[in-house]
Image: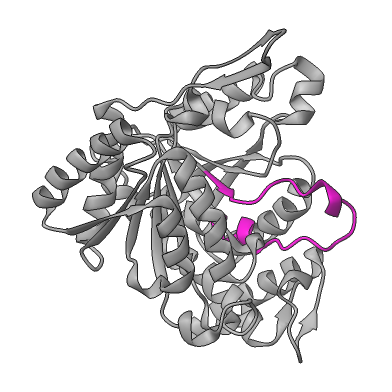
Amino acid sequence: MTWSNHIFVDQLRDRPSQRSFSLGVLRGEGIGPDIMEASLQVLSVLESIGQNRFEVTFGGPIGKESESQCSRPLSNEVVKFCDELFSRQGAILCGPAGGRFVYDLRKRFDLFCKLSPIKVADELINSGHIKPRYLKDVDILLVRENVAGIYQGKWNETFTQREGKRAEQEISYTEMEVRRIIEVAARIAACRKGRMAVTIKDAGMPSVSKLWQDCAIEIAQKYGVKHSFFNVDYMAYQLVQSPREFDVIVASNLFGDVLADLGGVLLGSRGLTYSGNFSGNGASVYQTNHGACYDLVGKNRANPVGQILSLAMLLRESFGLVRESCLIENAVMDVWRQGWRTVDLEEEGCNVRGTKEMGDLIAHNVIELSKAAVE
């Protein structure tokens, strides 16, 4: 299933005759360059065994590295780079970065919708901290509003002798912002199991929650999907307690951020989390949901799979290369099936390998599975 068709509603995304694609890369910082190298190795192998060609170009520093050079986590150079890629119907594969980079990038290009798959792999069902019987068949799509809410609200700090420091942060949502993200969630839910869970906090944030509730009731009826409302604290509890009860979850910027990380517990590791960020006009950026992990730099311990799966998502959602996307995903699953793990997924009887070695194994499996498919 291609989810982006429910976002790019006015864009022509099916390009069956196209064999050349523009792909921009922002390597990121911390472990970013290492996990990106593993992902690009997989892309290179995919290109060598197929008929598709990928024009890969690289953007400049992002995050804290960019701040140290030009005082901004998102530089004018990177903005121009993204603009040029999007003008060619390209997509961007982005490594992790610190500071406000992701928030500024999403706001600048109106990447209002973030899709985070939380689909538990049978091969890893014994690797995590939750009993396997609760994880079987978990397949959730988290739809997050990405450019409004508290992360994009105004903030201020004042000081008085009596109270000391006072920090303020504004949260607001317009009906347009809420409606367009719930529309995406409802359209996708209608093509899945027809269930949409809406995350709110009705007593703590009454006016914002009522806006989300009013919009959700109307839109769910429009698309014929069942809807339910969960306060965010109870949603967090149920996501771990009964994850199979959920199909599509839609949440605000803050709530969606927290729930996506919690989804990493279901997957077995935060290193497996990834997402696509989409605007309504075809722009898209794919990334991991974890940070730059500066403490792992140079240790060859980072899990590259989240970044590799974000590449697979890019190929499917932006370029329509479903077969190639599935080939990468199947290669990852086959590596796990053979007992290979990074240290974050270590379990009894497995073989632990580092970042580079895991990338090598997945790239090799892409070749082997491709050969098997034509025999």
User: On the rendered image, what quadrant is the N terminus found in?
Assistant: bottom left
Residue at position x 51%, y 54% in the image: 260
Residue at position x 70%, y 51% in the image: 36
Depicted 55 relative to depicted 223: above or below: above
Whether residue 348 appears in this view of the structure is: yes
**First to last magenta residue range:** 286-311
Image position of 251 (left or right of 225) = right
Percent x, y of residue 265: 58, 67
Image position of 105 (left or right of 353) = left
| Residue 12 quadrant | top left
Q: Residue furthest front?
A: 162
Q: Nearer the viewer, residue 231 or 5?
A: 231
Depicted 51 relative to depicted 333: above or below: above
Percent x, y of residue 96: 68, 43
**Please, which colouring scheme is shown?**
one colour
Q: Residue furthest right?
A: 298
Residue at position x 75%, y 87% in the image: 350
> Residue 295 magenta-drawn?
yes
Whether residue 14 appears in this view of the structure is: no
Percent x, y of residue 157: 64, 14
| Residue 273 quadrant | bottom right
Residue at position x 46%, y 64% in the image: 237
Depicted 256 relative to depicted 78: above or below: below
> Residue 179 magenta-drawn?
no
Percent x, y of residue 140: 39, 65
| Residue 73 quadrant | top right
Picture mark count: 0
Q: Nearer the viewer, residue 165 or 253?
A: 165
